Image (tube, grey):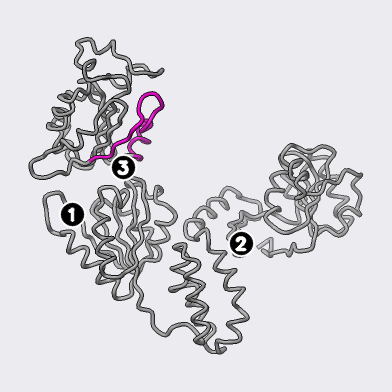
Amino acid sequence: MKSFPMFIKTTGRKVVIVGGGEPAAQKLRLILKTDAKVIVAAPVLDPEIAELVRLGRVEWYKNQITADFFGTAAFAFIASGCPGFDASIHAIAKSARCAVNVVDQPDLCDLTTPSILDRDPVVVAIGTEGTAPVLARQIKTKLEEGLPQNLGGLAALGGRLRSAVAERVPRSRRREFWRWVFTDTPRRNWDRGRERVTAQIIKEAIATGGAPTQQTEGHISLVGAGPGAKDLLTLRAVQRLQEADIIFYDRLVESEVLELARRDAERVFVGKVVGANAWPQDRINALIISEARKGRRVVRLKSGDPGIFGRAGEELRAAELAGIECEVVPGVTAACAASASIGMSLTERGVTNALVLGTGAVAETGDVSEVVSYAKPGASLCIYMGCRVAETLQAQLIQKGMPHQAKVHVVIDATRKTERKLAVPLSGLAETLKIEDIRGQALLMLTWPLGVTSEQSQSSNLEQIKPKGAIPPGPWYQTRQAV
């Protein structure tokens, strides 16, 4: 190492910044995370810094800069934006033996600012000795995925209770007590936002002289894996995967998503195929309940969002009947992913004012009339698992009055490496799906614009029909094409 990492105390100390423009503002945003007294020296301030001065968060120094200005400072940032002026101010600061950071001049820096992950009072600093700040930010992003936003609050709670622990918990049991607080039941409850419950659990343990000797409390998380791409998982979803003792996953969950789980977590495939019963829902319910009763942290990993055609309701009810805590971690559903992929908004002012998520996975009769009943001017329909009932769906929508040439977006395997996109007229939907041999993970997306009535849609001159608003008819009257 050419630089030694160290945290500098700022309480009751001043930090000075020379400069009043954007380079100085960048340093100011960083140092305002601390409790230091901040003084900015500059003849003129940009609006952001001026507002901070007005609010009393920063002191403005307008006099001539001398060595005395740096005399009692913990450290200084020199960031006027003028290399020559900054070098001259650096010389003055050094004459006062003040440690400095000179923006964009690493040879003049005693200090370098790291990339900071802030979970106050937990702070992680990543530095590259000024060689690769972009890499430091990438590492920070990776760490952000694994550290809950409220983690610092648990550390602060531990700090407030430390004297009570010293009084009530024998020295021989303290290390195990703190391990329990930060890795076991209290930590799991805290990560899930149950701060009051966590505090009560910890205080009860202190009162009894230490951590419980045996933990049997299990937990179930119904986690949305998103449409496929692992970088579309939420931070909370990644955290649950990294905490899990056992993961039950579907056939639509990508292998790269499972790679985010901790290596020693047990993985159980419970994939279901439409029409097959190798893993019926009641068997899956029994399995996840059984594992949770063993005190294990169970993740039920589902493609997309658990609450959208994911049968989460049945698993939630099973957990409730068993008296086991269960949470839902939302995921990006296929409709959002598919619309983003084709660059289309699911709603649009003056064109659509309703969004319907429907499913083609209906009874053996293939009756899709309930889904079709929601089709009307001003509505966008996103139909999951609709390929096998496409012919019926097409006929009923046209019969209801949707324009024959209304464009249907077909998105297969949204966000995956195998993603495909087609745009076809409604009247050719079923035939196109047969020709293209599309049967599986396809989402059908279509819009009936405002102002187009069923009578108008029957007109022989569809090109003359225009929805209300500025949107031209082109986007929804289009022949089949591969996108």
Indicate the amino acid at tag 1: Lys
Among the two numbered marks 1 and 2 on one chain, the one whose residue lies closer to the N terminus: 2
Q: Give the range drawn in magenta.
A: 336-358
Q: Relative to the observer, which residue lies in front, 87 or 349?
A: 349
Could you tell me the amino acid type at mark 2?
A: Asp
Q: How far apart are marks 1 and 3 (CA)?
A: 18 Å
422 relative to 302, above or below: above
On the image, the x and y values in percent for residue 412 come to 26, 38
Residue sitting at x 25%, y 48%? 309
Q: Which residue lies furthest to the left in this view?
A: 365
Q: Relative to 428, is 188 on the left or the right?
A: right
Instruction: Name the residue tied to disc 1.
Output: 272
Q: How far apart are marks 2 and 3 (CA)?
A: 36 Å
Mark 3: secondary structure:
helix
- Position of residue 89 measured from the top left corner of the image (x, y, whole percent): 85, 46
345 magenta-colored: yes
Q: Mark 2 points at which residue?
A: 120
Specify the quadrant of the image occupied by residue 443: top left
Find disc 3 in the rendering and name its residue.
Answer: 334
- Spatial separation of the CA atoms under disc 1 and disc 2: 44 Å
Amino acid, disc 3: Ala
Using residue 288 as the reference point, say whether residue 231 is left or right of it. right
Residue 231 image offset from top left, x and y in percent = 41, 48
Closer to the chain start, of discs 2 and 3, is: 2
Graded by Cα atoms within 10 Å as few (under 14), some (14 to 19) or many (20 or more), the crowding at tag 2 reads some
In the picture, which quadrant includes the C terminus?
top left
Q: Does the magenta stretch include residue 39?
A: no
Q: Where is residue 10 in the image (x, y as percent from the top left)?
A: 74, 62
Q: Which residue is found at the position 42% from the left and 85% from the top?
A: 213
